[in-house]
Image (cartoon, rainbow, N blue to C red):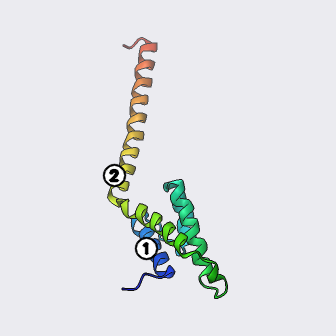
């Protein structure tokens, strides 16, 4: 079986970002930009190398400048990280953060009300 081409790997990375991180913007460039804060530094650097290679592959003369081994290594880093992400776990984490914020506000409000009642001599 033939090894996947650069365009195939770029399309697969774009699909993984769309499925796992829920960034459905059209281009890989825009998807990597939006996913940047959620990705570790080494994955962002590897993603930039993949993006650079995908930009060069469309031009016949510049396509020769692509180092296939470096591209494969960078694509493997990005794919490996994206395949580990569980969308359900990400959603659950966002829910827990939201509930933590709500509980903090409720506790702070309760403390403020008790302090106000104590200062007025009601307690």
Name the front one of labels 1 and 2: 1
User: Which residue is the site of mark 1?
Assistant: 15
Which numbered marker is on residue 92? 2
Percent from the top left, x then y, of residue 120? 45, 14
Percent from the top left, x then y, of residue 7? 50, 81
Residue 46 is left or right of residue 100, and the answer is right
Q: How many C-alpha atoms fall within 10 Å of the one at disc 1: few (<14), some, or many (≥20)? A: some
Percent from the top left, x then y, of residue 49? 58, 68
Quadrant for the N terminus, please: bottom left
Q: Is residue 49 above or below residue 99?
A: below
Residue at 40%, 85% (x, y): give it.
2
Residue 92 is left or right of residue 32, and the answer is left
Task: Return the disc, 1 or 2, that comes first in the chain's sequence.
Answer: 1
Percent from the top left, x then y, of residue 22? 43, 65
Residue at 45%, 19% (x, y): give it.
116
Residue at 37%, 43% (x, y): give it.
99
Q: 76 or 92, which lies in front?
A: 76
Q: Residue furthest right?
A: 61
Q: How many C-alpha atoms fall within 10 Å of the one at disc 2: few (<14), some, or many (≥20)? A: few
């Amino acid at each position: 079986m033939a090894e996947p081409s650069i365009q195939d790997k770029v399309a697969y990375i774009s699909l993984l970002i769309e499925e796992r991180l829920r960034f459905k913007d059209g281009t890989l460039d825009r998807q990597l930009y939006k996913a940047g804060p959620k990705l570790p530094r080494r994955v962002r650097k590897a993603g930039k190398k993949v993006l650079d290679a995908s930009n060069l592959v469309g031009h016949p003369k510049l396509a020769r400048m692509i180092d296939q081994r470096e591209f494969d290594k960078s694509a493997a880093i990005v794919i490996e990280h994206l395949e580990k992400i569980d969308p359900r776990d990400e959603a659950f984490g966002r829910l827990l953060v939201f509930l933590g914020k709500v509980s903090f506000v409720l506790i702070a409000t309760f403390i403020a009300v008790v302090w106000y009642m104590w200062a007025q001599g009601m307690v």
